[in-house]
Image: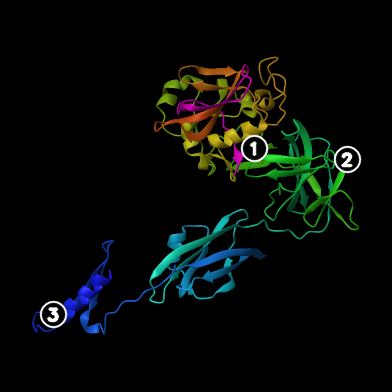
Amino acid sequence: MKKFFLLIALITMGLASYAQSTPNRLVVTMKNGDITVYNIADIDSLSFDLIEGEVVATPTFLSFEWDGDNGIVNYSIAKSEAASNYSIVITNGNVEEALVDAPKSNIDGESNGTITSPTPGTTYTIATLAYDKYGMPGTMATATFVVPEKSVELPAVKINIPDDFTSCMVQRVMLGDVKVAEVCEEYIKELGERRVIVYPCDAQGRAILTKGVSATDSGTAVWDLEANTCTYTAGNSTALSTVYLVDGEIVIDAPATVEEGTVEPDLLVDIRGSEENTYKIVKIGTQYWLAENLRAAKWIDGTAIEMFKSTQGTAWNANTTGAYHVYADDNDYISIFGMLYNGYCVEKGDQLAPEGWEIPSIDQWRKVRTYGGPAATNFKSDTDYSWNMGKEGTNLNGFNAWAAGYFSTATGDTSDGSDAWFWSTTPYSEGQSFQTLRINQSSTNVTLYTTSGHAYNFGHSIRCVRK
């Protein structure tokens, strides 16, 4: 490169002696093909410089503080000797795009930045792009952090432990109109049985799963969110009737002053225009599932989903939009079986699933199968006649699957009492088919179908998982 610029300089000076043919532009062509043109009349001199060392400004995340709805990010910057200044952004989006218009700074050491209305649990990136003294860009450097949960300042709250979870296995603890804690009767795989666990909630009303206290024996339940496992430490008491929320922690001993919380079923009320459905919720591992099959006859905007009867098999097969079928055309089945939806409904899942919920991918199904089973009996309802007589399950994990059967043009309505099929959103191939999950009365385990798929013209159940 030095030889190139020297050659340019010599050529420029040599050509200056020719009056009419003297060049008036200096054209610099880079190895990547970029071309920069200078007016020779504006050039005073050509010279070379050596910038030694990497041109970089390395960020280090120090801490995060909530400031109302916004967040203050504390970080430090260490510039290399060759770096003159740098651009900096804090973003949860495309780092390179954000750096294009980022303001420049030359501050070494600790500093801070503000992010507007961050979501707890979101990963942000602190990114810098350093420049040398001539403004040439050097190396981009990054540091990441996760926005922590927002603490809730509340008075001490008394929580009365329910003795019946049949209305919903997840109960919410309300102080006025604020959800402050959650009480779950849930399956603990590591113990092979259910426990009643109480969790404090963050400012968004989400249970903090690393702070569970067992009302069954005063033990603790600490969940690993990535591994979907629970570390359960047994306590030494009998079942508790009351616990307390104090400074964001669940404690057993009563504080001096306390306000009583209201404990009630944490039901999902799904309203779509004139249609309203209420669903029970169950916590299995670190996931929250509807404990009932979806039975919406409308999209979330309130418009009707097309319905086909069992006698309309040809029309169902030719249909290329979202549609549903009621098993055996008997509306009495809806409350226990839900609807049987085609694959086009799955394709439009964001318009079908209740707000804050989604149709599960095959990986989400795999996650609940791993923690909640894989024994099929754990998932099958223990209600009489939910399966063929004698084939009912234990419903140990609370999933409460009924044998709703399925619908297809080849078979019509079939397998109620013996089969439950559920859609996933994971395509099987480039064609119109999705992978599925099946619970069969004769199978020992829940089955994931990942090496085959069902075409869109099957009618299967949909069970939603919370986002």
Element under label 2?
loop
Whole-percent x and y of residue 331? 60, 25
Range of residues picked out in magenta: 438-467
Element under label 3?
helix
Q: Residue 444 appears in which quarter of the rendering?
A: top right
Whole-percent x and y of residue 464? 59, 37
Outermost residue, right side: 256
Element under label 1?
strand
> Mark 1 to mark 2: distance in Å?
31 Å
Which residue type carries mark 1? Trp
Residue at 55% across / 36% down in the picture?
363
> Mark 2 to mark 3: distance in Å?
95 Å
Whole-percent x and y of residue 291? 66, 33
- The reply to whether dot 1 and dot 2 touch (C-beta < 8 Å) is no
Label 2: few (<14), some (14–19) or many (≥20) C-alpha neighbours in 10 Å: few
Nearer to us in this view, 116 or 63? 63
Residue at 59% across / 72% down in the picture?
111
When the figure is inspected, residue 78 is found, relative to residue 168, above or below; the finding is below
Q: Residue 53 appears in which quarter of the rendering?
A: bottom left
Residue tagged by mark 2? 236
Residue 348 shown in magenta = no
> Mark 3 to mark 1: distance in Å?
79 Å
Q: Residue 418 appears in which quarter of the rendering?
A: top right
Residue tagged by mark 3? 15
Residue at 28% across / 61% down in the picture?
32
Badge 1 or badge 2: first in the primary sequence: 2
Left or right: where 375 falls relative to 103: right
Which residue type carries mark 3? Leu
Left or right: where 255 falls relative to 191: right
Which residue type carries mark 2? Asn
When the figure is inspected, residue 381 is found, relative to residue 274, above or below; the finding is above
Label 3: few (<14), some (14–19) or many (≥20) C-alpha neighbours in 10 Å: some
